[in-house]
């Protein structure tokens, strides 16, 4: 089990395991999904910075969750999609799959814009 040093608010060193930190980042990822805030950008930056601590199956879960949210329209907005896309690229998802997801995002965004103008 690897140890990771994190500084808390009082700048005292606290210890946690990389597995614990990976879990926290995953929960942050789930919380940020669908948010139209800076949360996705911050979470994606942390995930990318710490990509090496995730096992292959955990990386695959990130990819599957992003794909599911795109299909369901729960990714946030185009700005957030661009963040989630960074994880797909890091996970080496093939270009064709990313392109299909991008098309779905654009269709969802067009649908939302049409619904807003119809009211």
Image: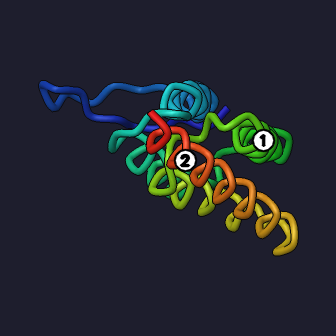
Name the residue carrying label 2.
114
Say whether disc 2 or disc 1 marks the residue closer to the N-terminus: 1
Q: Is residue 9 left or right of residue 25?
A: left
The furthest residue to the left: 10
Q: Nearer the viewer, residue 25 or 106?
A: 106
Residue 23 vertical position relative to residue 6 in the rendered view, above or below: above
Lateral position of residue 71 relative to residue 41, left or right: right
Q: Secondary structure at mark 2?
A: helix
Please name the residue that numbered disc 1 is placed on. Answer: 71
Q: Position of residue 23 (x, y in %)?
A: 61, 26
Near mark 1 (Cα within 10 A), the count class, few <14, some 14-19 or many ≥20, is some
Most foreground residue, 14 or 37: 37
Quadrant, the N terminus: top right
- Figure coloring: rainbow
At 33% from the left edge and 44% from the top edge, which residue is drawn?
A: 38
Of residue 115 and residue 68, the one placed in the foreground of this image is: 115
């Amino acid at each position: 089990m690897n140890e990771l040093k994190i500084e808390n608010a009082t700048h005292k060193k606290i210890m946690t395991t990389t597995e614990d930190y990976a879990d926290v980042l995953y929960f942050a990822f789930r919380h940020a999904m669908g948010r139209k805030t800076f949360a996705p950008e911050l979470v994606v930056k942390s995930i990318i910075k710490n990509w090496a601590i995730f096992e292959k199956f955990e990386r695959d879960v990130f990819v599957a969750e992003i794909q599911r949210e795109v299909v369901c329209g729960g990714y946030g907005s185009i700005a957030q999609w661009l963040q989630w896309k960074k994880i797909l690229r890091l996970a080496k998802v093939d270009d064709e799959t990313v392109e299909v997801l991008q098309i779905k995002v654009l269709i969802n965004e067009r649908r939302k814009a049409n619904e807003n103008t119809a009211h």
